[in-house]
Image (spheres, grey):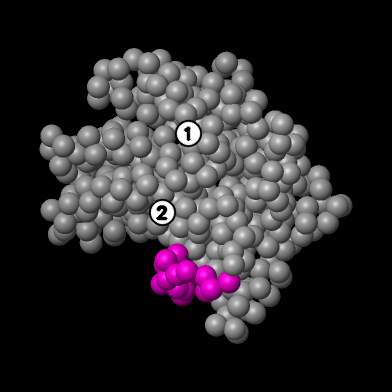
Amino acid sequence: MEQISTWVSALNSIVWGPVMLVLILGTGLFLTLGLKFMPIRRIGHGFKMLWQNQDSPQSGDISPFNALMTSLSATIGTGNIAGVGTAIAIGGPGAVFWMWCTALVGMATKYAEAVLAVKYRETDVEGNYVGGPMYYIKNGLGARWQWLAIAFALFGAFAGFGIGNMVQANSVADAVHTNLGIDKVVTGGIMAVLVFLVLVGGIKRIAKVAGAVIPIMAIAYLLGGLIVIFANISQVPEALMLIVKHAFTPTAASGGFAGAAVMVAIQMGVARGIFSNEAGLGSAPIAHASAKTNNPVRQGTIAMLGTFIDTLIVCTITALVIVMTGVWDSGASGASLSSAAFAAGLPGFGEWVVTFGLIIFAFTTILGWSVYGERCVQYLFGIKSILPFRLFWVAAVPLGAVVTLDFVWLFADTLNAMMAIPNLIALILLSPVVFKLTKDYMERH
């Protein structure tokens, strides 16, 4: 295991180097400029589209709202709780600023992904709508780019077991063991059974579960964070200044914090930002491709809300609680740091907000990512591969619950980057299609 960890660590330092940071932020900035800042300007329009019925008959399997909830079920998870804590523990408060930057340009990225997913989606032999990067690469770029579609599907299938499965199971098992004293093996086994019971219903059942659970748990978690923030409202300006200051200047060692250079803050902010909102990974468009809609732009405006909600709202509240309560330099990391912050802000109650939030968010993330991995495997091997994939997916849950956390995070980070590369290339090459569809839609409306 130690040798494998060394190899993965070496690969991680390459794929998450300066080139990847430029590629992710550069692609988002390019799309933002090409769309004339439409995703930022039209956030209100996105929320309006989320609740507005379409006039024409719609093609698809799930409602636009449930498509967004399925996407959010995969993104609102450990990235918002443990990921933010890890970013601050390693990169300092300045990492939060770079998470914000990643989200702002990531809205355009997520928008473009969903537009292309609906534009180039297909129906499988059972009549289900399937789409995502592998399909818009194949149908949008042509046969000579088929290798890129296969590369994405391969990386996506494997990445799911890291970011969407073992990381989530590991974080839940750790939190339950720390707070309730329940053995990690038991937690892993219970989660595996629950995941199996939902998975047998396919994307429609997953979407229904996500549509019911995610809004309730997200609101509860946000209320807990807002109570802490408003109770310490006078400290908000100081916390924001600390975040902005250390985004551009090194963070000195203090307490249990070892100190961090600006480059580390940028790397952690971008990496954990992408881990949280998944803009650029190509995962969310797989869910949005199943939405009941005949207009790619409408679904794109709904899809971009995922990044806004995930990072600019949920992650920001977690970060502010960590910084404002003064525990960011305590030496704790991940979910433990977030839990300590909420416990300090809401004595006797705050740690339970984090614990139950982490459990629900991580569980729904496992469900959401099962859709992504399943679609990738289906693209590669056909519809008969779905059942074996689901069995492997369920088996990975208890395994993830007991493995070393550091290796799981490293594994997930590395696969995220490998998955993003084919998708970002496709987004750049297909950007003229996105720009034209958007322009045509805006001229009609």
Give how far across and how far down residue 279 sits, in percent.
54, 53
- Depth check, front residue: 370 or 434: 370
Number of other residues with Cα within 10 Å of mark 1, as a class: few under 14, some 14 to 19, many 20 or more: some
Q: Please tell me whether residue 40 is drawn above or below residue 389 in the rendered image.
A: below
The residue at the point 58 percent across, 47 percent down is 283
List the residue tagged with mark 2.
311
Q: What's the residue at 28%, 23% (across, down)?
A: 178
Left or right: residue 392 versus residue 342 is right
- Where does residue 149 sit, x and y in percent of width and height? 75, 47
48 falls in the magenta region: yes
Q: Relative to 190, is 35 on the left or the right?
A: right
Q: Residue at x 60, y 56 (%)?
A: 60
Percent of width and height locating residue 417: 61, 43
Query: Mark 2 or mark 1: which comes first in sequence?
Result: 1
Front-lying residue, 244 or 210? 210
Q: For residue 90, which quarter of the picture?
A: top left
Q: Quadrant of the N terminus?
A: top right
Q: Quick one: label 2, few (<14), some, or many (20+) residues within 10 Å?
A: many
Left or right of residue 71, residue 190 in this image: left
- In magenta, the rendered stretch is 38-56
Q: CA distance from mark 2 to mark 1?
A: 27 Å
Please tell me whether mark 1 sits on a helix, a strand or a loop. Answer: helix
The image quadrant where one finds the C terminus is: bottom right
